Each structure stands twice: as C-alpha cells, then as structure tokens.
Amino acid sequence: MPKVTCKCGVLKDKRAKTCRKCRPPIRLGTGKGWYMHSTGYVIGNFFGKLKYQHREIVSFYLGRPLSSREAVHHVDGNKVNNNINNLKLMDRSDHATLHLDSKRAKSMSTKGHEARWGYSYV
C-alpha cells in the first residue's frame, strides 16, 4: 500500500485533503481544539481521547453521558451543523435503519420513490 503524504511532506490519512499539521483548527461552539476530521465531523482531542462535538453537545444538553447504544442524528444531513435543534438522539439500530431507508430511496427510480414516499424528487 503506497504511503500518502501531504504537500508539506508529512504522512496523512488517504481520505484527508491535508495532514493534521496543515489543517486549520475549527473553533466551533464550545471553544478551542475542535477541528474538521477527514470524515466530515467536528472532533476534538481531550485527555488523549477523540470526542465528536455533536455527541458532546447532546450529552451536555441532557446532563448525562451518552451510552454506546445511542446515536446522534444530524436532521439536515450537515455534519458540521451541530446546533441542538439539528441534533436528534436515536437508538443506533433506528439510526442505521433511517440511513438505510434514505439510501434505498435515492437508489429507487422516480416511479418507485413516488409510490413509496408519495412525492417525486425529480
């Protein structure tokens, strides 16, 4: 497997545009240290642990830590929009089903989509 390097010469994740050193930190919401991960989510490193900002926001809002069985869904699909009104707490299996249904809907023909959902997206 070939090694992927950034324009500065440092090794980087093959999915990322730049290495962590060249990537400017995103200071969203709760302060310093948040940056855009190559997956598109805003994450931060706290005491050696990577934390997703959207999970931290929901956890703070609820006043309790989230369990591993809970998932946070971005209602508008924008992974950077971590406004509490855009975040929905779901069971992981329900979240997977939701995304599976949306992928199926996108892959269906216009007629199939209209039959299932009641409207045409074209």
Image (cartoon, rainbow, N blue to C red):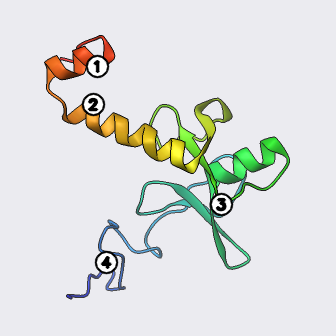
Circle 4 Cα neighbour tier, 10 Å, few/some/many (<14 / 14–19 / ≥20): some
The answer to whether mark 4 and mark 3 are in CB contact below 8 A is: no
Amino acid type shown at disc 3: Ser
> Circle 3 is placed at which residue position?
68
Residue at coordinates 70% horizontally, 53% vertically from top-left? Answer: 56
Question: Mark 2 against mark 4, which lies toward the viewer?
Answer: 2
**Badge number at residue 105:** 2
Amino acid type shown at disc 4: Cys
**Badge number at residue 38:** none
> In what element is the residue under mark 3?
loop
> Circle 4 is placed at which residue position?
6
Q: Quadrant of the N terminus?
A: bottom left
Circle 2 Cα neighbour tier, 10 Å, few/some/many (<14 / 14–19 / ≥20): some
Question: Mark 1 against mark 2, which lies toward the viewer?
Answer: 1
- Quadrant of the rendered image containing residue 69: bottom right
Work out whether mark 1 precedes mark 3 in sequence or the reverse, and give the earlier one. Answer: 3
Work out whether mark 2 precedes mark 3 in sequence or the reverse, and give the earlier one. Answer: 3
> In what element is the residue under mark 1?
helix
